[in-house]
Image (cartoon, rainbow, N blue to C red):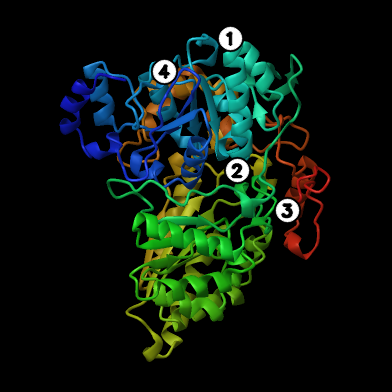
Amino acid sequence: MIDTEKLEMILPTVGKPARYTGGELGEVVKPIDGASVRFAFCFPDVYEVGMSHLGTSILYHLLNGMPGVCAERCFAPWPDMEAALRRAELPLYTLETKTALCGFDIVGFSLGYEMCLTNMLAMLDLGRIPMFAKDRTDADPIVIAGGGCVYNPEPMADFIDLFVVGEGEEVLGELLALYKSRKQANAGRGDFLARAAQIEGIYVPSLYVVAYNQDGTVKSIDAKNGAPFPVRKRIIRDFDAAFFPEEPIVPYLGVIHDRVTVEVMRGCTRGCRFCQAGFIYRPVRERSADTLIRQAKACIQKTGHEEVSLCSLSTGDYSQVARLVCVLSDEFKGTGVSLAVPSLRIDSYEGEYAQKLKEVRNTGLTFAPEAGTQRLRDIINKNLTENEIIEAVREAFEAGTNGVKLYFMMGLPGETMDDVLGIAGLAARIRDVYYRVPKEKRSGGFKLTVSVSCFVPKAHTPFQWARQDDMTVFEDKQRRLKDALRRVSGVKFNWHDARLSMLEAVFARGDRRLSAVLVKAYESGCRFDSWKELFDFDKWLRAFEETGIDPAFYASRERGRDETMPWDMIDTGVSKAYLWKEYERSQAQSTTPDCRKGCTGCGLREAGLCV
């Protein structure tokens, strides 16, 4: 344990000290003995964000249910706490037992967003763990990582001992059993990593050699010492029977998603060509409505939360969504518990449960048309018509909803200024729909929020070959759209920082050479880059300049069909040939149907991953 007397002295000096205390309802503290495997879950963002992450909650409770495994939590300290720890010469520690990170057997990071990587380096440094994997000895923890970012693990490859690719519920159990057996045999970390690489879903970057062409592109990726090539992702086949924590931790302070979250399904069959999650989390697997109703009721009873959220990539596509919404709305009616259904597809919003949502929901609805014109929606394979958009918002307005949020993307391949301004035209038509609804059905004044993000090409998608718009182009499009939306009353416009989106694109498609940039950015003080008040773009530019790396090489360069991608050692089950075919179809403005209407040949069936 760390010096708790020192800790007690510094906590009153920092903001929100409850971030760093632990002791919440539902926290698990297990007795530790010499045979235990100690695992630290590290989330590289603040407590309020990390405690809202369902995946971490699932794995935390799953591991603590295993005999001989002790799992604890650690979150990135805000800059005031980081400074206080350094002044007091205290290491970063876990909440449950106040143990320094360097005292654990395995330290695992959840990497869901590219712009959290400097926080990961800070946590390693503060936890007194050597930052580079090559510098660690048998006395140091094994550092692992999982999450959406590890489908291109290469920018983090110099820092991580092994990556868990895919869903962690089963593979972590196998990994910990191997660790325990090698620990009992007094085997070294090299022996453990070589054996771990043979577990399906485990990528050990030190066992792969990357060579580069003179133009900077990847020439080859070669496995050594019997490591597999490629590394196949892991999935849970029987999702209805998969572990779910019915007694989650209740945070001490308000968090981003202060509610019960139940996961209705994994995967998506729509095939939107920009969407990484839609490809890497295939195939679709559902939980039964009865299972979800039981889980929601149990969690509300155990935690006292006042909201239940139905979580998935596209909840409206869940086959039993109408029954689930109706049963839960009736169950919670009059109890003060509200029901949230995020990730709704516009074309799946049906009248039969629109009114039920209103009965238990006090917030507006969120839809994602993604593009303002039919031409661009066809390019990205949204398979959504304007008539469907208008009909869905009309149903929402007639059910008494006055607040609607629409998400769009800017800079998509093939986009013109007409497509950008089409967002404003669609907003105007939606406003007209609201005022055509009879007054007695309306609820308050018209409120429409238009949020527009910047397109980021992602690995394992049909658009992984596409270039990203330059920042100046993004900024011009944002100005033009803002001016157009000023003429549509009742609309609030939100947009993303193009500079941050450029950095996201760099690390989304980057390679191992970017580790030098990450270290420079970390040493210059970059932390919490996704937080507007702390983001310092000039520091990032200096980091690129000092390392001689051009960010445009990764963000703004279109790839050729035959180029070896830095992430080609990772196999999601969706073939690269299929992704290229979809890229070609996008250029022809040709759509591909939902695979539930017939197999589109993505490769999952041949890979044995269809369930």
Q: Quadrant of residue 203?
A: top right
Q: Between disc 3 and disc 4, whose residue precedes?
A: 4
Is the residue under label 4 in contact with that under label 2 (CB below 8 Å)? no
Q: Position of residue 356 (x, y in %)?
A: 47, 77
Look at mark 3 in the image and give the residue it sits on: 587
Instruction: Residue under label 2, please give it.
Output: 457
Identify which amino acid the numbered label 4 is placed on.
Cys
Q: Amino acid at mark 3?
A: Gln
Residue 470 appears anywhere in the view: yes
Residue placed under numbered mark 4 in the picture = 102
Closest to the observer: 472 or 30?
A: 30
Looking at the picture, tell me which residue is in the foreground, 363 or 295: 295
Question: Which x, y percent locates residue 360?
Answer: 40, 73
The answer to which of marks 2 and 4 sits earlier in the sequence is 4
Secondary structure category for the residue under label 1? loop
Residue at 33% across, 78% down: 445
The correct choice, above or below, for 68 with respect to 383 in the image is: above
The residue lying at 38 percent from left, 44 percent from top is 49
The amino acid pointed to by label 2 is Pro
What residue is pinned by disc 1? 186
